[in-house]
Amino acid sequence: MSPVPPRRHPARRTLRRLLATLGTLLVATVLVAPPSPARAADPLLSQGRPTTASSTENAGTPATNATDGNTGTRWSSAFADPQWLQVDLGATATISRVTLVWEAAYAKAYQIQTSTDGSAWTTVWSTTTGDGGTDDLTVSGTGRYVRMYGTARGTAYGYSLWEFQVYGSTGGGGGCDTATNAAQGRPATASSTENAGTPASAAVDGSLSTRWSSAASDPQWLQVDLGSVRTLCRVVLTWETAYAKAYQIQTSTDGSAWTTVSATTTGDGGTDDLTVSGSGRYVRMYGTVRATGWGYSLWEFAVNTTGGGTTIPGGGSLGPNVITFDPSMSAATIQGQLDSVFHTQESNQFGTQRYALMFKPGDYSGINAQIGFYTSIMGLGRNPGDVRIHGDITVDAGWFNGNATQNFWRSAANMQVFPSAGFTRWAVSQAAPFRRMDIQGDLNLAPNGYGWASGGYIADSRVTGTLQPYSQQQWYTRDSNIGGYLNAVWNMVNSGVVGAPANSFPNPPYTTLGQTPVSRDVPYLYLDSAGNYNVFVPSTRTNASGASWLGGSTPGTSVPLSQFYVAHPGDSAATINAALAQGLNLLFTPGIYPVSETITVNRANTVVLGIGYPTLIPQNGVTPMTVADVDGVRLAGMLFDAGPINSPVLLQVGTAGSTAGHAANATSIQDVFFRIGGAGAGKATTSLVVNQNDALIDHIWAWRADHGTGVGWTVNTADTGLIVNGNNVTALGLFVEHYQKYEVIWNGNNGRTIFFQNELPYDPPSASAWMNGSMVGYAAFKVANAVTSFEGWGMGSYCYFNVDPTIAAYHGFEAPTAGGVRFHDLLTVSLGGNGKITHVINDTGATAQGTDTVPVNVVSYP
């Protein structure tokens, strides 16, 4: 065994701080210096990329700190030789430069190595006389993986890097890649379409049985966004009968200024195989003379490129359903667009339209953004105060006669609001997160007229006035600051909320935890100072209290959008998997995504983010998404909607039997929602299975539909909403409803759940049809018999047996009798006396019954 290093003396720590400050100043000097002309064209490839190391000194100095672009954070290793730090660039690159910004603990001898597979390494630079500071190295090599391999430390400490930067270029090769259609599955738009059956996307879907066709006039165009600037070598147009006599092939870097790379005035239809030379991100066919009395019509529009044609580009357009507002726009223009979206979405509960409304940093006055179904409104600042709304963001329930219990699937995030009447109305129920909001006034959670609302979720926010639940049945607020509460109905649950009332359940019904044991905020889009999109990935918090941004910017890491595959409706699962395998993160833009093969997330630290409620629908009974048993995957902002053929599971996190620990860098599932039926017949045995240890579940709604289409006991079949097999799993804000067996099964040890809202299935045809052995019905939440440690706070289950109101479910909660299994502040309710729940938990608690809709409470169990 190696000797344990001595604890550091305070004077040593002071010296290291001084050296760190000096190092930071040095970094600033080096990084702002203009690069040499030979290097000017080579971009930084490593920032935000997956980074691993042979060891870390402690949890505060992880490998990712060396590639986060922040010279105030660092990686440091154990105090031994050798040690290494490596970054995955996502694709093979030609490496021209590596910059290492050392902390005081530097390397005396080290090598820079590259690899194509992360296993076999080639040394492209080495030294045995390293002296710390900043090493700016000119190198020559290729590889997907690049590492610093240290063999001799310059101090008694480990190796420590403020930043590890790799520069170079991806792609390569001069031949024309005719095997890869760079246009296939990419976003396509057109000057017009003949009808809904001939959209622009049909010309880039890889199918010769679908087509785009235009209006019958000149000129017309069809364009495709390749996602990044590419070098073009060939364009193939497969014309339908309505072809172009005269047209041009044009390219553009910005979609505005166009350059013609091919032209003809003697087109004769059929297939035009064109050799072209040019570059651009956008490519279009610009038709000026039709050959027939009809419009222009293309079966396929294919584009081939040189230089790494098989590399899938990151970044790109966010698509037509992302509407971006700028402070320079007039209030009337903004209001008109907001009203148009709301008119479409106000009552569009099961429609296919999806929208994201994004506000650039600045001030906006005199607007009222009413938010309907499948609509997300968000600020594009780094912090909520960067986008200031002097007006209103409103959710009400006029479409449903003042009843907000079906105000699902909408969200607000990352904005400061100065409400016109002193309060913001956010009358929602499930799947409507309110995150990173700064309300300068009161927040009213009830619809106009104080009609019913069913439950909701607030995180990382501030309300300077009072939080006013009024008619909300249950509500969960975490890691926030509020001026106070006005009232409570059945249970208002708070964790880490500054200003929350003291714990007093059940009279008044407040469940309050002073801190949230583990939490993090959801990844989000923002614009940097140069106007480029990035995704900010917040750090994990332990024992959090209050909003993360009130003391300064939320800690975390920025990842440029260029490191995301920006998916659009029509993209195939095969393309998405290829992008993930290449090392890209994944951003789903608003829309519907039929998934014909499982989307597999296998790389640690992958971010999978949806905006505007992208909806994944499995085809032919596949599991639409799985996550390997790896560190730090972030899943956020998606709706999984079961298909008509039964899927065994809709989302699986971690492989069955996973045993690895992930406490230092857990996977999180945030604002991820599941639906079985409602928009059409759907079937799935289990919605979410969490096999991974240490995972964080932060706000899910798993819903077997009780209304809509495709609804019935034998129609939208689903056993269980959530199964947790991993140990040390924390759930913050569980909403799980109407499943036909146990709604939640918790098999892992040392689990925690803060807030649970449930309705048992409405539609068992009879007690005999819903038997669990000798007991009537299945508990809403079952902690497995073998579990020895679990704790839950603020959990409720309701019954409303509208097919057979004589049913009496045996209990709402089921758990083993063990000293380590504890519950706090439980309740059951019979809604209007439609059925009964005989006990609250196991054999404890009175019967929930009667038309008064009064909860039965259990303050603690056992």
Image (spheres, rainbow, N blue to C red):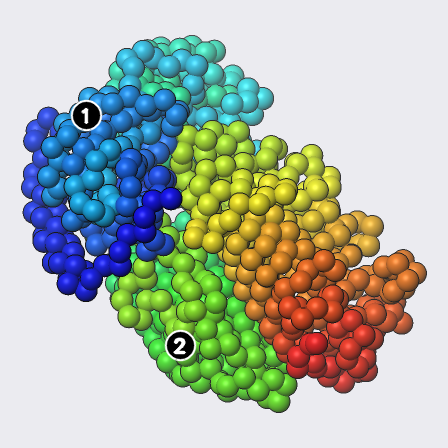
Q: Amino acid at mark 2?
A: Asn
Secondary structure category for the residue under label 1: strand
Residue drawn 21% across the image and 54% down it: 72
Give the SS element for disc 2.
strand
Tag 2 or tag 1, which sits nearer the N-term? 1
Locate residue 63, reporting x and y percent: 32, 45
Query: How many marks can you see?
Result: 2
Residue 643 image-quadrant placement: top right
Expressed as whole percent of the image width and height from the top left, the position of residue 74 reads 25, 50
Residue 852 to residue 374: above or below: below
Work out how far the residue at label 1 is from the one at label 2, CA to CA, in angstroms: 52 Å
Image location of residue 39, percent across then percent down: 13, 29
Label 2, residues with CA under 10 Å away: few <14, some 14-19, many ≥20: many
Residue at image coords 61%, 84%: 505
Can see residue 532? no
Q: Quadrant of residue 14?
A: bottom left
Q: Is residue 440 above or below residue 251?
A: below
Q: Work out whether residue 668 can be spotted.
A: yes
What residue did someone put label 2 on?
Answer: 481
Dot 1 corresponds to which residue?
Answer: 125
